[in-house]
Image (cartoon, rainbow, N blue to C red):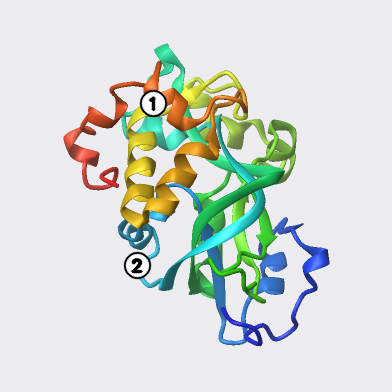
């Protein structure tokens, strides 16, 4: 959103800050009851974004400074959909984490304030940060966007699961996941392919940025390097028929 859309503009020096619960999101709701979302993986695809947020508006490309993408957490949705490969540790989804020297090409779009509870439930494992993306020519948006960032197992258990082992089991334990955030797992193959195709379809700039500014859990190996070595063949693999549309880029 351009300058002036926020009813109580936040100083950029105060960002990013964490949105710990639903009430915190009120700080980033615009005067017309909209919330901006920042996409960096599957949400680089407008089709994918609309499958999750059918009523989104103003889908556009943007830039975000000070973060990098990392494949470093287990995602139960991949087990539910039959595309996780625990035997090879190919179970990881994507998050972002602060990294001062990095810049990401992202997307941003608006959803209704009423969609926030469903958003929190769907992105349950993440730390929600309010950030300020900018246009490709360097103009900052004044209404912050919510970004799904790396959490920790300890904080997740205390804050999202409210210290309940039962909640943790229903979300993760029943899939044999005993630790969520890990640095020694690999990207889920179908999901990685989907994200790469989403970036490629968005723009050449987004594609190159995704390949060179997205890392394995070692924070050293880029996705470009991974796909050229031990991850070779991933881009040629078709997803299973029942999820082909969802993971089609």
Q: Name the residue under label 2.
A: 54
Q: In this view, does 112 lie above or below 230?
A: below
Q: Is mark 2 on a helix, strand or loop?
A: loop
Q: Which of 137 and 66 is in front in this view?
A: 137
- Residue 124 % position (x, y): 57, 47
Q: Do we see residue 163 in this rendering?
A: no
Near-viewer residue (209 or 248): 209
Q: Is 242 positioned to the left or the right of 80 in the image? A: left
Of residues 175 and 7, the one nearer the viewer is 7
Q: Do the residues labelled 2 and 1 touch (CB within 8 Å)?
A: no
Residue 198 percent location from the top left of the image? 35, 49
Residue in the image at 61% along x and 42% along y = 68
User: Could you tell me which secondary element the residue under label 1 belongs to?
Assistant: helix
Residue for point 31% across, 26% down: 234
Return the residue at label 1: 227
* Disc 1: CA contacts within 10 A as few (<14), some (14-19) or many (>=20): some
Residue farthest right in this picture? 13
**Where in the figure is residue 13, as x and y percent of width and height?**
82, 65
Q: In which quarter of the image is residue 227?
A: top left
Q: First in sequence: mark 2 or mark 1? A: 2
Q: Which residue: 39% across, 35% down?
A: 192
Counting labels gives: 2
Q: Is residue 141 above or below residue 210?
A: below
| 2 on left or right of 192 | right
């Amino acid at each position: 959103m351009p300058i002036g859309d926020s009813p109580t503009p936040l100083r950029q020096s105060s960002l990013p800050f964490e949105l710990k619960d639903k009430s915190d999101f009120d700080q980033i709701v615009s005067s017309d009851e909209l919330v901006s979302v920042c996409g960096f993986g599957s949400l680089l695809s407008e089709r994918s974004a609309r499958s999750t947020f059918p009523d989104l508006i103003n889908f556009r490309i943007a830039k975000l400074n000070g973060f990098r993408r990392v494949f470093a957490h287990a995602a139960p949705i991949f087990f539910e959909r039959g595309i996780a490969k625990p035997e090879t540790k190919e179970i990881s989804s994507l998050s972002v984490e602060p990294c001062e020297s990095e810049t990401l090409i992202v997307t941003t779009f608006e959803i209704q304030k009423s969609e926030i509870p469903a958003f929190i439930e769907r992105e349950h494992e993440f730390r929600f940060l309010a950030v300020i993306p900018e246009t490709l020519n360097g103009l900052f948006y004044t209404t912050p966007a919510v970004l799904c960032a790396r959490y920790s197992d300890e904080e997740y258990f205390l804050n999202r699961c409210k210290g309940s082992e039962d909640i943790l089991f229903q979300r993760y334990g029943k899939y044999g996941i005993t630790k969520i955030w890990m640095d020694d797992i690999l990207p889920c193959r179908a999901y990685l392919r989907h994200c790469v195709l989403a970036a490629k379809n968005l723009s050449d700039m987004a594609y190159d940025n995704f390949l060179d500014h997205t890392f394995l859990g070692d924070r050293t190996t880029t996705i470009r390097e991974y796909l050229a070595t031990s991850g070779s063949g991933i881009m040629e693999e078709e997803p299973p028929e029942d999820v082909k549309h969802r993971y089609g880029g």
